[in-house]
Structure formats: C-alpha cells, structure tokens
Image: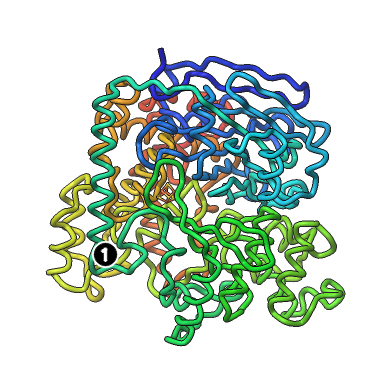
Amino acid sequence: MRYGETGFNLEIDLSRGNIERVETDPKLTELHLGGLGTNTKILWDRVPPETDPFSPDIPLIFSTGLLGGTPAPGANRTIITAYSPQTLLMGYSMMGGFWAPELKHAGYDKVIFRGKSPSLIYIWIHNDKVEIRDASHLKSKGAVETQELIRQELNEPNAQVAAIGLAGENRVYTASIEQGRSSASRLGLGAVMGDKGIKAVAVRGTKDINLARPAEYIELCNDVLKYIKFRNENPVPNVMTILQGLGSPQEMLHVDEAWHTQNFMWGNARTRRKDFWNKQIEERWKDVQETVRTRLISCYNCPMKCGAIISVPGLSTYMMKCFSKLTYTMAAFVDDLDFGFRIAQRATEYGVDGFSTPQIMAFAFELKEAGILTDADFEGCPSDNEGKFYWLLDRIVRREGIGDILADGIHWAAQKIGKGADAYAHNNIKKHEQLPLKLGMLNPVYFLMYATGEKINITQIEGQFPQSPFATMEEREEFISDWIQCPDEKFKQIVLDWEFRGERSNPYYPTVDMSVDIVDWQEKMHYIDDALGVCAGLSSFPLKPPYHMHNYPHFVSAATGIDMDEAGLTQVYNRNRNLLRAVNVRRGLRRADEVPPEDHWKKRFPELEAQLLDAYYKFKGWNNDGIPTKETLQALDLGYVAEDLEQRGIIKNVKD
Ligand code: SF4
C-alpha cells in the first residue's frame, strides 16, 4: 500500500492517442518526495538537453505534491513543468485551487503528456476512466469560459478544469494555464500546452487517499489550523500590512496600495511616482474594489481566502488575486483601478501571465516613443492609454503584426526588433520579466535570490526572514520572541543586529556568509513546499507561517510512513535543488546568466556582488561557474548526474 501518494501516474501519448496508468517507484518518493522533485527527475531522465521546448518529446507534467489532497491545510498545489519557451530552461509554475486534490482523489499523482495531438483536444479523467476528447468546438474560447463549457458538456459541475485561452493556442510565450481559483502563469507553460494541442484537462476523483498514521496526521493538521487562527487574530507587528498575515498577499481584501504604487515602477519599469497615493485615490480605489469584488474565495482546504470573484458590469466573472490587481494599471499609467479590473478580465480569458504581459506592452510603447518602433507598427492603435493597451493585448494573443514579435516576450522581441531595443529591456533576468520593483540600495539577500533562483521569478522566492531591519531594539526583540519557525539561533542574532544605517546595514549587512545562509533557508522552504504541494502562502512565503522546518518532517512521516527528520528533509531539498540546477546547467545556464537587471538597484556594488555569488556557489558545493561538482552530486545520490555532466565535458576540467 502507498501512503500520501497514490503510487500511479497517468502517461498520455498525444501523438498515438495512447493512455497508460503506470505504477511509480517508491524509492523515487524517498529520494525526491514528489511534485517538483519527481517532475525534475522525469525531465532529467527523459529529455536530452538539446530538445526544443516545442518538441513532441518534451513531457508536460501536471503534478500533485506528496501531501496534495490530504487533510493538510493548503496542500492543493498543482506543479506544472516543461521547458520554458521564454527562458529555454526548466519552467515550473504552480497553481492553487482544486485541481491537484481532485487528481489525487481520481487515483493519480501526475499526468504526463508526451507527443502532440494532430487536432485540438481535451482530456477527461474520471477516476479509472480517461478519455481524449475532441475540442474543436472550443477553439478560440476563453480560458474561463472553456472550463464552464466543459463542465456543462460532461454534466459534471464538480469537475475541476485547467484550460488555456487563445494565447496558449497561439503559443504566446506568456500564456498561462487557468483553473477556477488559480492559474499557472509564469514561464509560458500555457504555450507548451497549446503546442501539444491540449485545450483543457478536466478531472473528477472520488477515491480515498491513504495515510500511514491518520490520527497523528490529523492532530498535526489541527495544530496548523490553530496556528492559522492565532496568526489571523495576531498579525505580525511592525511590518507592512501585506507581510503581517498569511496567504498570498491579501490584495483583494486590502485597498491600501501606498506601498505598491509608490515603490514599484510604473510604465516600462522606469518611472517611480512617489507622491501618487493620497486619500482621494484611496477612497476611489476602495469604492471600485468593493463594487467589483463579489466575494473572497479560498483554494481547496484552506481558510485564508486570498482570491476574489471579480464581476465587472457587462463582463463575465473571473478570479483575481495578488498583485495582478495593479500590473496593467501601473504599466499603462492609468490612475483608475477600474481599468485594471476590466482589462484583467479580458487577459484572463485570453490566458496570459498578468505580470509579464503588461510589461511587454509598456516596453513596446517605450520603443515607440524612442522611435525604434514606428507608427506603421501601430496602425489603427488608439491614442488613449487604456485603448492602446486593449489594442496591443488583442494583437499579442492573436500574433498579429507587431503583436507576433511581442508575443515571444521582451527578450526575444528585442532581439528581433534590433536597433538597440534590448537597452529597453529594463527588467529581465534569464530572459524573463520580473516584477518592476526597483530599489535604492543593493540588498545582498535579494541580490542572491534574484540572481540564482531557479524559479526565475521574484515572487515566491522570498520568505521567513524579514525583508528589512526593524527600527528599534524593542521591535526586534518582539519579533524574535515567538519566532518558532526560525531553524537556527544565528538568524535571531542577525535580526537583533541589523540596522538601517551604519556598518550593520545593507549592502554589507547581513554579511556575505549570513546572506548565503538566509537564502539557503528561504530556498529550502520553497523547494519543500513545491515537492509536498503545499501553498507557499502558508509556509515559505510569510514571515511566521504554520508550516516550517520543525513540523514538516512530522507531516511527511505521518502521511507516508517514510522516516523523516530535519536532516533528512534538508538532504532531499539539496538533492532536488542540485538536480534542477543540473537540468539547467545541461541547458547552458552559467554564472554569466545570474545577473539581476542592471538598474534593479540604484546603487550597485560589483565587487560585493561577485563575492556574494562566489560564497553562494561555494556553500552549495558548486564551482565558480555555478555548476555542481562531482563530489556534491555524489553525496546527494546524484552520481548518475555527475557522470552525465562529465561525459558532456561540463565538469571535466573544473576544480572544486
Ligand atoms: S493561503 Fe491563499 S493561495 Fe494559499 S491555499 Fe490558502 S487561499 Fe489558496
């Protein structure tokens, strides 16, 4: 009997129309847990590194996490992986909602798609019955609309449906996969899904999930629920509102946007409006938000209600959460929040990433202002800011005219446009658009997370360590007094000593070694969440969450029967981290790629940045080019990876 997981994957060959239920190797669960860990292993094993992201050989994997669908609150993430057409590296994106728990209850841990369908299809998974169905009647339909149409067609109101819109069908590199209460938006996995000819994957499951020690597990879950209640009633003091609680930033609840509108850049990541926010705007935005927000909603088995159903008069309803509330508004320089809610409805139906897409459009208009793109490229484009953005969004998702070039994202568009266009790519790392947060002084911890994060986007790589110092010693002492999540006393001392100014302030404090330690802790929590399928909003992302390094091993043990402790979990994290790095190293990732945007901080320190990277690589057991050494890989049971890298000459002549 398998516990926590089902022990079976669905393998669907779209070229042949073949469907198989395949038993998985429990040893791999011990080595990698599940979710991101086992997805990475499959990608390593099955795909030669030279494979194109749109090759039929690329497996597109929809995975549950090891704890997904169990009673653990927030264990609902669907981890989707392939190669990203945008970065050409491994792309992984996560969505909440209900899809993964439904799949687990249908009796599968993952669905692995290979090949390409010759025509547009959707998949219907209903426990043991799995069908490939014609989707020609759904062509060009919206991603949200498609979900409802499929539920009606199947007469299954409880089916969970993950779908793409027109952007995915047209292989737009920022195409998302939308699912009721969430979406997997980053790194263009919707384009890979569209390339395979999959319009949607619908699932309904009614089977049980076995737990190794159910009574103990339920007790652990109850402790988590108690902590969530406590934290909701006792917000973390002395930090900004969005960091005080749990969940993904509660953007649908809060209307105080002083911090985002004044600190994030407007337009094409180049203009700060320090005096934007005022009482009148706050009143106006509050009114708009409360009018269109019909109710707050949660993902499967979570009390946090991070998302909202948005209903703009005259438009069909959709789900929104987090910072996408502001991304279009700020990129288009429109002062009305109402515009953001309206255009996001169209963008959600098209199925595009709400972080990258507005920036791509702002980039295009900056190129036009600079004379690099011309009036001919924008023939028929309205002159007002709102109209311009709607016009260009339509062209991008349809790949019409200049929209066809922009549909590949800022990096690739700049290469095609030439004429110095790449100087206007203000905000990319590893060919991917970041949040337009530009700061004054280099922050060493954030420098490392931005530069080296394999997830590649800034959201959800930060975590349980404060983002900035506390003003007074009383505040610092108060913060550490109930910091049960802290894995080591040394982090408490850093919080006590960290100042806004002087020797113990950014960029030289936290010191290089401390910064590496902090980043390792944050990364560890994210990698564990992504393998277990637990929402980062209850674990790696907030300052004081209910899941942490001290209770996670108990969850793994009670759910699966695997004997797990903190050292064991750290070993799994290191294994998964290094395997993912090796996948990307085999795809060509090197130190030269690990560079945050040039103007990301006003004050840069090249020497310090080099020291930070050196120390981080050393800590990880990587060489100076960011490549894991043979010894590191062998110590993590990844000897086969070392052999492969050696055969390819990647680690042959490298000294440790
Ligand atoms: S914390 Fe928020 S985003 Fe996470 S599972 Fe709960 S409702 Fe969903």
Along the line of sight, the residue nearer the viewer: 352 or 39: 352
Quadrant (top left, top right, bottom left, bottom right) of the N terminus? top left
Q: Residue at x 56, y 65 (%)?
A: 427
Left or right relative to 612: residue 273: right
Left or right relative to 608: residue 79: right
The x, y position of residue 576, in whole percent, is 43, 34
Height in image: 606 above or below 641?
below
Q: Residue at x 61, y 79 (%)?
A: 334
The x, y position of residue 405, in whole percent, is 78, 60
Left or right relative to 177: residue 252: left
Residue denoted by label 1: 509
Left or right relative to 512: residue 614: right
* Residue 53 visible in the picture: no
In the rendered image, which quarter is residue 335 located in? bottom right
* Residue 408 visible in the picture: yes
The x, y position of residue 154, in whole percent, is 69, 33
Height in image: 57 above or below 499?
above
User: What amino acid is labelled 1 in the image?
Assistant: Tyr
Height in image: 502 above or below 584?
below
Q: Residues within 10 Å of mark 1 (few under 14, many from 20)?
A: many
Q: Residue at x 44, y 33 (%)?
A: 68
The x, y position of residue 176, in whole percent, is 63, 50
Along the line of sight, the residue nearer the viewer: 44 or 404: 404
* Residue lying farthest to the top in this orientation: 1
Label total for image: 1
- Mark 1 residue element: loop
Q: Does mark 1 have its CB less than 8 Å from ligand 1?
A: no
Along the line of sight, the residue nearer the viewer: 468 or 214: 214
Along the line of sight, the residue nearer the viewer: 529 or 83: 529
Quadrant (top left, top right, bottom left, bottom right) of the C terminus? top left
